Image: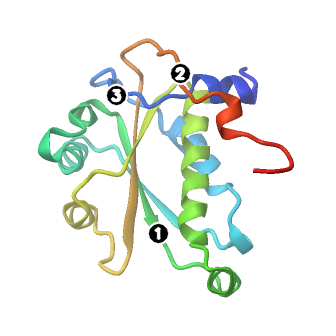
């Protein structure tokens, strides 16, 4: 089992998946439980995860992520997790208003990170997508019109080896005691 820091170091945005290789439902459930158990402001849990695995629907949703030549690799994903923003509790809404912070969006980001790290722990590749046809996907999977589809997470077995992670130097992004 990898340590947490090893998971963080090895998790990457995979853009090539082994076509046709299915993910067991139990594995998907463990991955999604990581998102479900993520922390959120005032325990508001402002998310819903719709998991698309059925072949024909998966192909249609993948196509809706691939406009203007983007995300062509999604057609080979074994599952797509659609992350929808849901209403949060009153405490989170009041706090967000007082502090002028979009807590639900932050919370969805945290849950998405947990899902992708859990996927890495299960030996899966993942890629978080923000480029997609929201209206088409909502229609395909019957997401209510008054809900916002925030992200799509492509999951599958990576078809390419890990890349070297390129990040800014610590000194450029971390400081202690003063900015």
Residue 46 visible in the current orientation: no
Image-based side of 81 in relation to 94, left or right: left
User: Is label 3 in a helix, a strand or a loop?
Assistant: loop
Residue linked to disc 3: 15
Could you tell me residue 12's position as x and y percent?
50, 28
Q: Nearer the viewer, residue 24 or 99?
A: 99
Q: Residue at x 71, y 32 (%)?
A: 171
Q: Where residue 59 sits in the image (x, y, percent)?
A: 19, 42
Quadrant in the rendering for residue 76:
top left
Position in image of residue 162 (x %, y %): 48, 15
Residue labelled with disc 2: 165
Label 1 belongs to which residue?
85
Distance of label 1 from label 3 (alpha carbons): 25 Å
Please tell me how crowded label 3 is: few (under 14), some (14-19), or many (20+) other residues with Cα within 10 Å: many
Residue at point 73% right, 20% down?
A: 1
Sequence-earlier tag: 3 or 2: 3
């Amino acid at each position: 089992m990898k340590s947490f820091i090893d998971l963080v170091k090895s998790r990457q945005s995979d853009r090539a998946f082994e076509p046709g290789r299915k993910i067991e439902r139990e594995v998907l459930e463990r991955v999604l439980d990581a998102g479900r158990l993520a922390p959120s402001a005032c325990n508001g849990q402002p998310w819903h995860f719709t998991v698309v695995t059925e072949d024909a629907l998966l192909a249609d949703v993948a196509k809706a992520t691939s406009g203007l030549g983007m995300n062509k690799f999604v057609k080979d994903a074994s599952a797509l997790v659609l992350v929808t923003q849901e209403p949060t509790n009153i405490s989170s809404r009041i706090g967000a208003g007082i502090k002028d912070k979009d807590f639900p969006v932050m919370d969805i980001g945290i849950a998405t990170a947990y899902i992708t790290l859990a996927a890495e722990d299960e030996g899966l590749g993942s890629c978080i997508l923000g480029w997609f046809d929201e209206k088409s996907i909502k229609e395909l999977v019957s997401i209510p019109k008054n809900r916002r589809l925030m992200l799509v997470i492509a999951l599958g077995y990576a078809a390419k080896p890990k890349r070297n992670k390129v990040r800014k130097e610590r000194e450029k992004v971390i400081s202690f005691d003063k900015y």
